[in-house]
Image (cartoon, rainbow, N blue to C red):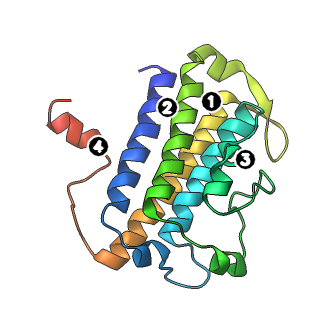
Amino acid sequence: MALKEFIRDCLDQNYNSLVKSLDGLTPEELSWRPDPQCMSIGFMVWHSARAQDFLVQTVARGSHQLWEQGWADRFGSSPGNPQDIGFGFKTEQLEEFQVPERSLLLEYFEATRSNALEYLDSLDDGSLCTRTVSGPMGGSLTLAGVYQQAIWELNQHGGQIGYVRGIQKGLEDRRFTGGVFEAARDGG
């Protein structure tokens, strides 16, 4: 499997798992936080999409984020600082965060995912491994490293989303593994 195909499969698996995790959640469940210092599911979805937008648009492409191109307005926010993606939010900021409707969260996440895939499609494995960009915390990263960080963000927060959902709803479909084993079982 080529690197580009692997990255695409990871982004697809993360998205499919996210959609499944959000299915059937009420606005109250999306907004619920187990503790005042914890993030809600809705916040984690927003943050994951913001991180994906920041990493692909700002870091990899050196361009304006989708957030700045109308999405902030749709969320009732100002574009503000492009690096304001929810990283390091304090308890007060988590408290002030207004979780939007699930459909809007998914639309923005899907837009950032589609954008990440579109950019990925414009690259080949060689450029993923050799083209470097300035890292947001200094130094330089390959484009593969940028996508690696995006996948790490999605994995980390996807797991947290599933865990918080489990706290609220208990065990559900214990056979769901994110899609890979199901596809293999079903011959896909």
Q: What amino acid type should be assigned to the residue bearing mark 2?
A: Ile
Mark pair 2, 1: CA separation:
9 Å
Q: Earlier in the sequence, mark 3 or mark 1?
A: 3
Mark pair 2, 4: CA separation:
15 Å
Q: Around disc 3, counting alpha carbons within 10 Å, would you say few (fewer than 14), some (14 to 19), or many (20 or more)?
A: some
Quarter location, residue 58: top right
Query: Image point 57% across, 34% down: which residue?
Result: 115
x and y, in percent, of residue 173 in the image: 21, 61
Q: In front: 17, or 118? A: 118
Q: Which mark is residue 144?
A: 1
Q: Around disc 2, counting alpha carbons within 10 Å, would you say few (fewer than 14), some (14 to 19), or many (20 or more)?
A: some
Q: Around disc 1, counting alpha carbons within 10 Å, would you say few (fewer than 14), some (14 to 19), or many (20 or more)?
A: many
| CB contact under 8 Å: marks 2 and 4 | no
- Number of callouts: 4
Residue hosting label 4:
179
x and y, in percent, of residue 45 in the image: 52, 59
Element marked by disc 4: loop
Q: Is residue 165 above or below residue 72?
A: below
Mark pair 3, 1: CA separation:
24 Å
Q: What amino acid type should be assigned to the residue bearing mark 3?
A: Glu
Q: Which mark is residue 7?
A: 2
Mark pair 3, 2: CA separation:
25 Å
Considering every residue shown, the one lying at the far bottom of the view is 36
Residue hosting label 3:
68
Judged left or right of residue 103, residue 54 is right
Q: Earlier in the sequence, mark 3 or mark 2?
A: 2
Element marked by disc 2: helix
Q: In front: 119, or 177? A: 119
Q: Is residue 32 above or below residue 69?
A: below
Mark pair 3, 4: CA separation:
33 Å
| CB contact under 8 Å: marks 2 and 1 | yes
Can you tell which of label 3 and label 1 is closer to the viewer? 3
